[in-house]
């Protein structure tokens, strides 16, 4: 259940279910409607107390069909229900049409031309009793373009007549206007500001990428997944074509708890060198803090030994602040080369506080030449902004780049420009495609940071760590948090994690530490919170 689907993958699964006789469209639509009802009363318990009037906004596709099912089921529960249709009832697909007609036996369907939103709910004394629930079943996975101007205007009018807090808002599969593959609003006219935020969005079968990426979480409010009875493993096993379509399935990040453990069957009687020796390169005097944060995190995450390699003028500053982390002198690339003659030094971290300079470039190229597993972060990336190709030519599969948005833009300006251009049609390019293209160009693992962190192995695994919903970690937006993440990745690689696994586990632990610590968090706290997080995770 940790998968994030594209709209096309969801359609392929549904089609396979129809073709194999696992379910009919009508059955799925009924379960979808039922699933929304169950999910919303569970997630929004106050809704049951507000039992009164619901407004169901139905669209021209099957998302609208789900809306008609929800209308009927709410009516059966005693709700007063109004159904509005954006679209021509004569052009509805058979399943949506069947549910439209079933609802028609119960109540009216108000066509879009007769919505007159302001007249109904906007006056000082509304003509109609305002609803306590608004269900958005206009568009779901079939959205391909921005909402038409007249519909967009009607929805904005509705949002101003019934602002947040006046009525519960529940979206079926997606807030209409949001691209489900990217989490980006298809809304160039309004700079990506959709007409309204939802209190809850109910997805079917699995989450879609757009629920977790980009602005998706902001517009979805909360998410729930309704089981509509699709047996994906059985469908996948029986249908090679589906297997092919699902082969690039994106997963939500999970920590590798087995490998995080020390001792036990996997490492009986282990020595500290069995857990590797990470080296973190430090900047000069007054600029050592970032590297010290990274080094401490590498040690806390379980590297057997961690050495901070600092230039001579910064040695006393570092020595006065380090205990378990060791210290060695490194005045530049030749010193690093000498240091790396010791084969036991098996993972490196370069970038935090290193400075944007030719000396940094030389250190990076020496590190890459040693073929050690290596994290390149911050200044180690920015130092190559003028000539990214000079970096890419030396990268290898043991390297993890950890750019934030600004660093990504400097290294991959063309990909960045395409990524941020306001999308006018769907599916819009997502952070996943942007990261995949960048990783393929760079030839190494890329961890593209953000609230929606995307980790990509060229031609391989794609993992998303989304710090949203119940895993929101707003206190992670603090100076030095990125340095800690880089150190954690280096520490895990020293322990023997594959680079992509190290990035995935570190991204999860990093957010978990922030969630566990809570308000007031600063970067120093992250490493100190790791023992509690590891213990709570059963490590
Ligand atoms: N398949 C199943 O069995 C199940 C599906 N389920 C449900 O179905 C949903 C997917 O249904 P869907 O494929 O019909 O797409 P949907 O999102 O309703 O809308 C597409 C329609 O809108 C149109 N259109 C697109 N953009 C537009 C715009 N901006 N402005 C105006 N029109 C626009 C587009 O037609 P077009 O004009 O592009 O030809 C098309 O007619 C899914 O999210 C889930 O809720 C569940 O019941 C489980 C079982
Ligand atoms: K919707």
Image (spheres, helix red, strand yellow):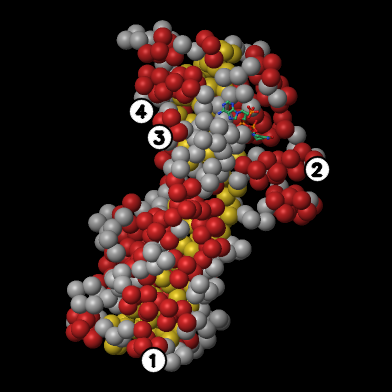
Image point (72%, 32%), residue name: 25
Asked if the residues shown at circle 2 and circle 1 are in contact, with their CB atoms under 8 angstroms apart, the answer is no
Structural distance between the alpha carbons of marks 2 and 1: 63 Å
Return the mark for residue 20. Answer: 2
Question: Is residue 416 placed above or below 512 in the rendered structure?
Answer: above
Q: Secondary structure at mark 1?
A: helix
Return the mark for residue 191. Answer: 3
Q: Earlier in the sequence, mark 1 or mark 4?
A: 4
Q: Residues within 10 Å of mark 2 (few under 14, many from 20)?
A: few
Q: Residues within 10 Å of mark 1 (few under 14, many from 20)?
A: few
| Residue ID for mark 1 | 338
Q: Earlier in the sequence, mark 2 or mark 4?
A: 2
Q: Secondary structure at mark 2?
A: helix
Residue at the extreme front of the image, as rendered: 387
Structural distance between the alpha carbons of marks 1 and 3: 53 Å
Structural distance between the alpha carbons of marks 4 and 3: 24 Å
Structural distance between the alpha carbons of marks 3 and 2: 43 Å
Q: Earlier in the sequence, mark 3 or mark 2?
A: 2
* Foreground residue among 508 and 430: 430
Q: Earlier in the sequence, mark 1 or mark 3?
A: 3
* Foreground residue among 513 and 418: 418
């Amino acid at each position: 259940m940790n998968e994030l689907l594209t709209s096309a993958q969801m359609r392929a699964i549904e089609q396979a279910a129809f073709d194999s006789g696992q379910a009919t469209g009508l059955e799925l639509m009924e379960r979808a409607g039922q699933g929304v009802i169950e999910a919303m009363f569970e997630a929004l318990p106050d809704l049951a107390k507000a039992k009164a009037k619901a407004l169901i906004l139905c669209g021209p596709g099957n998302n609208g069909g789900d809306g008609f099912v929800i209308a009927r089921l709410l009516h059966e529960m005693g709700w007063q229900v109004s159904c509005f249709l954006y679209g021509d009832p004569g052009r509805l697909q058979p399943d949506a049409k069947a549910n439209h007609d079933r609802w028609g036996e119960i109540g009216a369907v108000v066509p879009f031309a007769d919505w007159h939103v302001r007249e109904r709910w906007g006056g000082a004394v509304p003509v109609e009793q305002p609803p306590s629930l608004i269900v958005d079943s206009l568009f779901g996975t079939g959205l391909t373009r921005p909402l038409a101007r007249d519909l967009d205007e009607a929805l904005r009018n509705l949002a101003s007549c019934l602002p947040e807090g006046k009525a519960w808002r529940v979206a079926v599969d997606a807030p209409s206007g949001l691209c489900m593959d990217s989490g980006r609003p298809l809304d160039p006219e309004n700079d990506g500001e959709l007409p309204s935020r939802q209190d809850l969005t109910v997805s079917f079968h699995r989450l879609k990428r757009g629920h977790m990426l980009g602005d998706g979480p902001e517009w979805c409010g909360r998410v729930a997944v309704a089981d509509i009875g699709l047996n994906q493993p059985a469908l996948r096993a029986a249908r090679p074509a589906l297997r092919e379509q699902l082969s690039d399935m994106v997963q939500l990040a999970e920590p590798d708890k087995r490998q995080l453990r020390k001792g036990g069957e996997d490492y009986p009687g282990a020595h500290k060198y069995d857990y590797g020796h990470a080296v973190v390169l430090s900047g000069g005097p007054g600029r050592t803090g970032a590297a010290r944060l990274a080094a401490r995190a590498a040690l806390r995450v379980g590297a057997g030994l961690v050495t901070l390699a600092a230039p001579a003028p910064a040695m006393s500053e570092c020595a006065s602040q380090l205990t378990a982390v060791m210290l060695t002198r490194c005045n530049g690339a030749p010193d690093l080369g000498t240091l790396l003659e010791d084969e036991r030094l098996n993972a490196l971290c370069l970038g935090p506080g290193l400075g944007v300079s030719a000396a940094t470039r030389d250190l990076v190229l020496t590190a890459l030449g040693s073929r050690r597993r290596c994290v390149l972060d911050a200044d180690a990336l920015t130092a190559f902004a003028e000539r990214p190709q000079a970096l890419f030519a030396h990268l290898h599969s043991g390297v993890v780049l950890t750019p934030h948005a600004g660093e990504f833009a400097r290294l991959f300006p063309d990909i960045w420009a395409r990524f941020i251009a306001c999308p006018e049609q769907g599916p819009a390019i997502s952070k996943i495609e942007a990261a995949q293209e960048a990783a393929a160009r760079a030839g190494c693992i890329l961890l593209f940071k953000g609230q929606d962190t995307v980790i990509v192995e060229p031609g391989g695994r794609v993992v998303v760590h989304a710090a949203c919903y119940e895993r929101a970690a707003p206190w992670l937006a603090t100076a030095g948090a990125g340095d800690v993440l880089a150190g954690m990745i280096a520490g895990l690689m020293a322990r023997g994690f594959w680079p992509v696994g190290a990035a995935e586990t570190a991204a999860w632990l990093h957010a978990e530490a922030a969630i566990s610590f809570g308000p007031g968090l600063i970067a120093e706290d992250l490493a100190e919170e790791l023992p509690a997080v590891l213990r709570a995770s059963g490590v």
